[in-house]
Each structure stands twice: as structure tokens, then as C-alpha cells.
Image: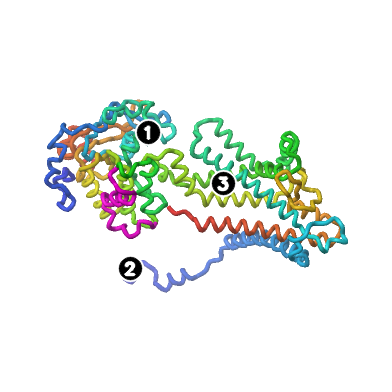
Amino acid sequence: MSTTAPAEPAASSIGGELTRSRPRPGETAFTWALRGCVAVSIGFLAALLVFVVYQGWSRLDSRLWNAMPTARESRIDEAGVQSAITGTLWVVLTTAAIALPLGIAAAVYLEEYARRDRWYLRLLELNVQNLAGVPSIVFGILGLGIIARRLGLGLSVITAALTLALLVLPTVIIASREAIRAVPPSIRDASYALGATKWQTVRRQVLPAAVPGIATGSILSVSRAIGEAAPLLLLGAVTLVLFNPAGFDSTYTTLPIQIYNLIASPFESFRELGAAAIVLLLAIVVVLNSAAIYIRYRYAKRW
Amino acid sequence: MSSIGPRALPPSVRPRPETLGASRGDTAPMTREVVLQADGVSVHYSGVAALRDVDLSIRRNEITALIGPSGCGKSTMLRCFNRMNDLVSGASITGTLTYHGHDIYVPEVDPIEVRRRIGMVFQKPNPFPKSIYDNVAYGPRVTGMDVSDAGFSDMDQLVEEALRSAALWDEVKGKLRSSALALSGGQQQRLCIARTIAVKPEVILADEPCSALDPIATSRIEELLLELAGRYTIVIVTHNMQQAARISDRTAFFTAQLDDSGERYGHLVEFDTTNTIFNNPTQHRTADYIAGRFG
């Protein structure tokens, strides 16, 4: 090897240089700083979880979903949050049924049909981005003023669903656009070159290829809607509801609002039920987010 | 350095040794019907010229090669023939381009109908993320082709025939339902050719179809194109001059140059039989390029 080249150092000294570990304080400090950041977020989350599970442990049983809420402390042992669970299902499923088709269609239009060189479309895009950052309470005010009062839909399931649909629409549009944009142009070219129309290309190539991304974005939007409380505070969900919703025009309450009411109670027993409801809400959101992650990996890019 | 000409090629890469010296274009230079005719075609992208003033005739059942350095507009020219440039925002084309004498850029013409007759194979194999069968059946399905009108008993037969024509049938007949993305690059490209053939086009445009392939896959595609030239009119863009020499009847040499205001644009330098372009070009720029002195 290097024995014929006299100028090179002996093999043993190279070995020594390679294995000698040099102290790199900057490197080490930075690594630990990053670990610290992760530890803070994980630590807070874990502490919250432990606290909530500990406090709600005695109420984590079938009463939670089998029984209705109550306002009387004497009845709290037999009470649950069933009306809030069914209310959440009603509101969120209706929200999804409104927001997903609208949002995906809007994304298809913006990505596949709209002409990028038009100034008003750029303005539109900018506004969609901005809408995603509007505080949700503002959507609540909009829902109250326009949907509940002007349109006369009242403080009902449909008002809540329409408001939440508006709230998550920008997120659905942005996520769907990303997914559609990730479909390689070569797939579209191939389809057009075979004599396919634009709609055939979108329907048979672009959308199927974008489904994983669209589904992931949609599920994350829906799980946001599930956890949303602020706009519903203005839209009639605060009242004590002792029955399950019977239709779109029904009064309702939802889990986040129910939790808000229970936790604010001066009675320990109410707060325990609230903690149990938090665990339930977290479990629902975790399941939905896991589904989103599963879909993302299951249908990972195939080209 | 004229050794790149067709005569110098080893026999193994000369599929038609008897015709290469005097290619089919020479034997019947003017008798073949003109399928596509470009007259003074210029293409601009967002106002910037990509290609200026091209006159070009594509004749029936010939292989026409478009060669030249990068940025010379040869792919742009190719994409004019089936109106794929329509899909590029900001693209505009002037001049006339006729298909059997019909201007394909007048407003009444439906670009979708044009593309059904003039198919295209792309640089990078781009099968759909679907099964092999569905890749081939896609074109006939979306165009609403009547399988029995096309002379087949059913879609299965059409798919088989297209795959046979693309010399792929024997390799894939046992796995028609498996994903096209599991095929090798060369197989994928032949699948893309099969997919194009399935819609029964008259013309096949190929945009550097071998540039992403290894030499063995490349030679298979070349053999295939030579076979298909009996039934189809083929226009191929290639960076590879040997490839143009091996398979084409006519060659158009494009190059890029700067105009008075310093803008770079592509234009056609010389168009003749492949034999003339490679052995006896009239333009010194063609000779320089063929000899490898630039580009």
C-alpha cells in the first residue's frame, strides 16, 4: 500500500489520527439543545396526558357514552356525555360532507383548470392561504351573523356544520392542491397524448394518484373540526342538551364544549367527568391522525 | 471525422444494411405522400422565441429524425405536431401546420382529435401507475374506440395485439394485471409505445425515447421503431446522431443561435435524406455538428 511512498506517514500514525476523537464542543452543545427542545414538547404533552388520565380514571367507563349529562351534582355519578358524542358526530360528519367535496373541487379547479397568469386567480390563492390563518372565533361570528340569523338556520347542527366547513375549507383546499401538484406532469402528458380530455385526465389519472395526499389532508382537517370549540361557543352549543340530535335543525352540543362546561364546574365530580371526556376526545383525534399517517405510508409515492 | 455516417456503423447496429446507404427516402424521394407539413412555423413561450420559421415535411411511413444540440427547438417542433404545446401556458405558435392538407391550428380543430391520430412517446418512460393491461386499454377506453370497428373481437385481443406490435407480449403475457411500474425501463418504454399504438394513430412522435435507457434496451426500441415504420409514420427527436443515422430516412438538423437582440432561438438548418445529411451536407454547420466539432 503506502510502503512504497516514503513521503507518506506510517500506517500506524494514520490509524492513530483516524481514531483519536477530537472534542467538538459546538457540535455537542447543539445536539443537546435540540434534544432539550424535543424534551420540552414531549414532556408537556406527557404531563398533560398523565394528569388528565389520572383525574378522569374513575369515570373512564361505559357511563361516559351511555348516559346523558346532568346539571345536578346529586346525579353526576350516573351522568355521561352521550349527547356531546352524538352531537360531535352529527356536526363533524356534516362538516366533512360539505367541506370535502367543495374543497377538493376547488383544488382541482385551481390546479388543473385555472390559468396561473391571471392576476385575480393569484389574489384568490393568496386569500385562500390567508383564510387558513383567520382565528376560528371570527368564523363563529360570521356563522352567527350570516348563517344563523340572516339565513335563518338558527342555532342548529347545520349552522355549526356550515361554519366549521368554512373554517376547514382553506386547509382542505391547500392540502388537496399539494397532493394534486405532486402528481408528475408526465402522467398528464401521457394521458393527453392518447387523446384523453381534460376531465378524463383529471378523473382517471390525477385524482386517483392524488387520493392518498387528499385523504391525509382531509382527515387532518376533520380532526381539527372535531377539536374546535371557539366558533361553537357563539353558535348555541353551550346549553345543556339532554337528548341526541334528531336532525340538521336540532339543537346540539359537542365534546369540546361539554368539556369546557364540565371543567369549569366548581364540583370535583364534574371535573372528573370532564377529564374522562378529554381522554375520549384525544383518543378519537389520535385514531383519526393515525389513519392519516397510515394512508400516507400505505400509498407512498409509486413513481 | 465522417466516420459517424451510416456506412461506418458495425453490421450489428445496421438493421437495414441494404437500405441504409441509399435509404428508403432515396429510393422514392418524392413519391411518398406528405402527412405533416410545417410552413414558416415559429413558437414563442411567453413572448420569447423558441423556434423560428421552420419548413418541414413529414412523409408517410418514413422515419424522420430531428437532431441538434440542446435548446435548438427540436422537441418544441415535435410537440407542435400533436398540439401538446397547447398545454404549456404562454405558448403560442404562428405559421401553418397541416395534417393531410388540413390546418390543425385553426379554431375549429379539436386538439383531442389531433392527438388521437398523432400519438406521442416521451423521453422518460411514463406508464400510468396502473396494471400493464390498463395502461394499454386506457387510450381506447378514453377515446371511446369501438373495438370491433378496429377489427378486434374484444379489448383483450386489442391489448394483446398492441403488446405484440411493441415486442413486449412474450415478456408480459403472464402478468398483464400486475403494475406497469414493476417493469424495467426499456419494457416500460415499449409499453408506452404499445399504449400509443393501441389507439391506432397514423403518426407516432417520439421525443428522445431512448435517452433514459441502457444500450441494449435502446437497440430493442430502435428495432421496434424500424418495424413500426412499415405501418406508421414516425418522427423521432434524438440527441444521438448514430441513432438518427441507424434508423431514419430523413434527418432535420436544428440548431440554436442568437438574434440581433441577443435572444437565443432554435431554427432548422438543413433537412434532407439521412444519407445526404450525414455524408454530404450542404451547410457547414451541419457538417461540423455531425463531425462532433460542436454541440
Where is residue B292? Give x, y as percent. Answer: 23, 43
Q: Which residue is mark 2?
A: A5
CB atoms of marks 1 and 3 within 8 Å: no
Q: Which residue is mark 3?
A: A175
The chain letter under disc 1 is: B
Q: Dot 1 lies on which element?
A: helix
Inspect the image, locate mark 1, and give the three-letter code of the amino acid beneath it.
Pro
Separation of residues labelled 1 and 3 (CA atoms): 32 Å
Q: Is residue B72 visible?
A: no
Q: Residue furthest bottom?
A: A12
Quarter residue B123 falls in = top left
Inspect the image, locate mark 3, and give the three-letter code of the amino acid beneath it.
Ala
Separation of residues labelled 3 and 2 (CA atoms): 61 Å
Disc number at residue B111? 1
CB atoms of marks 3 and 2 within 8 Å: no
Quarter residue B144 falls in = top left
The chain letter under disc 2 is: A
